[in-house]
């Protein structure tokens, strides 16, 4: 695998950009060079990633004026006030509008760095260097940036495309197991949305992925990004089918908000959310019990929880889901599975069916 | 003039939108209707405008769920924390992504409401109802939204286009004289950028404009928006010639930052900034003394200051100008006049010439 770089192009007209996938990429000056336009580079990272990779990235960028912002690590810090630290730094260093912001870290770092790049002087250059599996397969494609609000996740943000994404699979070796599993939740999601062949592949290779075999990881990232890119290219601003990417997310966001950001990892919540979506799809007669069991089994083998934490009963779930962005005109729109590997966005289901799932999975505080 | 509505289209491909200019428009339900897509409308206004026009606008929108946010009035409140009040309200009212944010007021309200619309759930619908001359001729076109930062004006923001702009000239009757003059600074600017014929017209009609003759106001707004739209359509994201619109602004921003936001009106600072740009253009041999005098005379007849306040000496000016967005790679880029009615963006001038202007206009605290 060493020295093989796979380049995947995300096609969005004048906002198209490449994703580089491979080993030993973050130290490769040549990858960054065509995407940096001025002399000024701000690397945004966090306290976990900085000791591991900041120095390597800085040495690859020694030709530029490089400044850094090191944020606290965790979804609970994905707030407007922490985000402001990035803006403050850009101003304190007097960075101009040709500067480049690099997000080095997981999804939280990428979302905040990207949103800072989107808003600083109404938009400067942005490069994403995702160091978690979740960020590599999810944030790499789609241009979603933003921060959370106490009343809802990702409620403040922008669609903003990077100049390029550098997904270095070497960085996955330092990831803890929970983070690796969280990433696999999104990988499995792509199979379920519209790529049944990939779902089959994942069933065969989930153990190898958990063992961090580089060839398998590289393939899973490439296929996930490619699947996501196809959806995003058709619907950049989430007017229609892009909502498919929210499979498991409406349930998942309710879990994250309900237990407080930072308790459950996003991917863990999505893993459980996928199980809940599968349950509702089965109740609607769209998915057979066998398929539901296969999905649950794969989620479990990927080291993910298949049920929400106690403390969220059906009523609380419903309340949390109703502030989610996927609610239009007070109807809950969900991504559900018509069959294994084929999902749809729909609000055409009896609310009693949804209540059935929420009662099945929701539990009062123990 | 009554009941005549002029519609000017700003052409930006899929982000094109109409500007409606005329009398008695804000109460016209039919104007809003095609541009509101959901049921939820948030009107953002301020403590000065609310008692004058909020009720009229609300009654025109009685078919919708209308909520309001009333901000304090003034440039000093164009901050991230005041902006957050808009976001908080959107979330507290549980507005979904099909909601519409209406900015009812001057440039500050429009910039903050527009930036909230740009960021809420990564972008919701936005309608601008500018009630000052400045906002009608400036913020109506171009999609610039944002807030100030203690270290620089408009440093946080987004390019975000409205669904439509409703410029009701009746609202100019309640404007105080300083505000009217501030708007005329931008009007004069359009003449100087590239419309010498309009400059001549302004010299003939400035007294009538100061007397708020409706026909003259409507014409000046239409021509200003049309001039600006032509520049913006060619360069939506300010990569090149759009910077022409900053004539007078780099000097002006330095004045605003130097005296503290809210002391001088933006348009007043731009008025003086135009005089300073004219002075530098004359020093460079581009503008003759007669033209410089005509420009100064028109600025003065429009009720605007032609010199900065005391307390800003040449050094402080230079320091303030160097954090401005128009600085690239440490060279100051300015909009200067090659001749009356024809401006260029340039950093090709001797810095001693700029120093000459700053020494001429800068004064230590008295």
Image (cartoon, coloured by chain):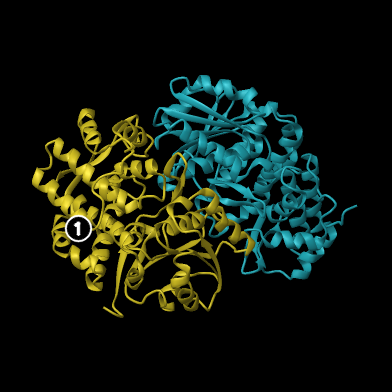
Chain colours: A cyan, B yellow
Q: Quadrant of residue B38?
A: bottom right
Pinpoint residue B335: horizontal percent, then vertical percent. Answer: 24, 42
Residue that protrudes farthest toward the right in the picture: A366
Q: In this view of the protein, can residue A8 be seen by the observer?
A: no
User: Mark 1 — residue?
Assistant: B301
Horizontal side, residue B109 vs residue B3: left or right: right
Instruction: For mark 1, name the chain.
Output: B
Q: Give the class, few, some or many, for how many residues have Cα within 10 Å of label 1's Cα (few <14, many ≥20).
A: some
- The residue under the point 67% across, 44% down is A186
Q: Identify the image quadrant of the C terminus of chain B.
A: top left
Depth order, front residue of A291/B71 = B71
**Left or right side of B189 for B238:** right
Q: Quadrant of residue B363?
A: top left
Residue furthest out toward the bottom: B3
Where residue A307 sits in the image (x, y, percent)? 82, 50
- Judge from the rendering whether residue A64 lies leftward or rightward of residue A22; answer left or right: left
């Amino acid at each position: 695998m060493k020295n093989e770089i796979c380049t995947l192009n995300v096609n969005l007209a004048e906002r198209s950009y490449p994703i580089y996938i491979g080993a030993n990429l973050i130290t490769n000056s040549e990858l960054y060079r065509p995407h940096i336009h001025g002399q000024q580079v701000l690397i945004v990272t966090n306290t976990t990633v900085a000791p591991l990779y900041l120095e390597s990235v800085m040495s690859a960028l020694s030709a530029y004026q490089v400044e850094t912002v090191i944020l606290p690590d965790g979804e609970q810090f994905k707030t407007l006030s922490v985000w402001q630290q990035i803006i403050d730094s850009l101003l304190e260093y007097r960075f101009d509008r040709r500067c480049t912001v690099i997000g080095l870290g997981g999804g939280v770092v990428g979302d905040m760095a990207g949103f800072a790049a989107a808003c600083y002087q109404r938009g400067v250059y942005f490069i994403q260097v995702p160091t978690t599996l979740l960020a590599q397969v999810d944030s790499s494609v789609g241009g979603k940036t933003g921060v959370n609000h106490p009343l809802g996740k990702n409620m403040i943000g922008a669609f903003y495309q990077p100049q390029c994404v550098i997904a270095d699979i070497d960085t996955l070796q330092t990831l803890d197991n929970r983070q690796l599993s969280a990433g696999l939740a999104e990988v499995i999601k792509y199979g379920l949305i519209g790529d049944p062949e990939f779902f089959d592949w994942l069933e065969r290779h989930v153990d190898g992925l958990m063992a961090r075999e580089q060839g398998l990881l590289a393939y899973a990232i490439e296929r996930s990004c490619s699947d996501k890119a196809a959806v995003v290219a058709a619907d950049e601003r989430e007017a229609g089918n892009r909502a498919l990417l929210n499979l498991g997310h409406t349930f998942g966001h309710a879990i994250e908000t309900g237990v407080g950001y930072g308790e459950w990892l996003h991917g863990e919540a999505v893993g459980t959310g996928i199980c809940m979506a599968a349950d509702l799809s089965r109740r609607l007669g769209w998915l057979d019990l066998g398929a539901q069991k296969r999905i649950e089994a794969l989620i479990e083998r990927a080291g993910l929880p298949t049920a929400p934490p106690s403390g969220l009963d059906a009523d609380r779930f419903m309340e949390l889901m109703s502030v989610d962005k996927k609610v239009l005109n007070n109807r809950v729109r969900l991504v559900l599975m018509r069959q294994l590997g084929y999902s749809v966005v729909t609000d055409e289901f009896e609310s009693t069916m949804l209540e059935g799932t929420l009662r099945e999975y929701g539990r009062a505080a123990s």
